[in-house]
Image (cartoon, rainbow, N blue to C red):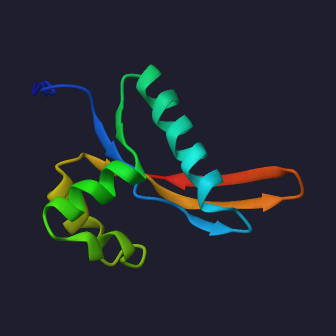
Amino acid sequence: MLTVVAAGPPRVAAPGFIRENVTPATEKLVNEQLAVDFARQGVEVMTSAQVQAALDAQKLGDLADCEAGSCVLEIRTVLGVDALLLGSMAKLGEAIQLDAAW
């Protein structure tokens, strides 16, 4: 039997979402709330602002704008996270629909 023990809580980066009729400010608010909700479940989340700052510090800021899937492994490796939270959000009337996967 093999037992794996994590060195700490799972780490997830949320670099941002594809937006449809959603302002950057609303995306930031949703992203920050997701980080809080995940933290309550024991998952550490890097928000889009933290991801951008980390990539900029390593002079890799252009990776934040890569197309979905084209550099996911590279971003994950550079950030040292277990997974990326990717998805889209759209404003539908007064509601925001969020589709996300990791």
Can you tell which quarter of the image residue 15 is in?
bottom left
Q: Residue furthest right?
A: 93
Residue at 55% over, 50% down: 28
Can you tell which quarter of the image residue 42 is in?
top left
Left or right: where 91 falls relative to 37: right
Task: Where is residue 63? Give x, y as percent.
Answer: 28, 73
> Which sits in the foreground, 9 or 91?
91
Q: How many marks?
A: 0
Task: Where is residue 79? Give x, y as percent.
Answer: 20, 53
Q: Is residue 90 above or below residue 2?
A: below
> Which sits in the foreground, 97 or 56?
56
Can you tell which quarter of the image residue 61 is in?
bottom left
Task: Where is residue 80? Give x, y as percent.
Answer: 16, 49
Image quadrant occupied by the N terminus: top left
Residue at 38% over, 75% down: 65
Residue at 52% over, 46% down: 31
Q: Is residue 61 above or below residue 92?
A: below
Q: Is residue 100 above or below residue 69?
A: above
Left or right: where 61 falls relative to 95: left
Q: Is residue 99 above or below residue 66?
A: above
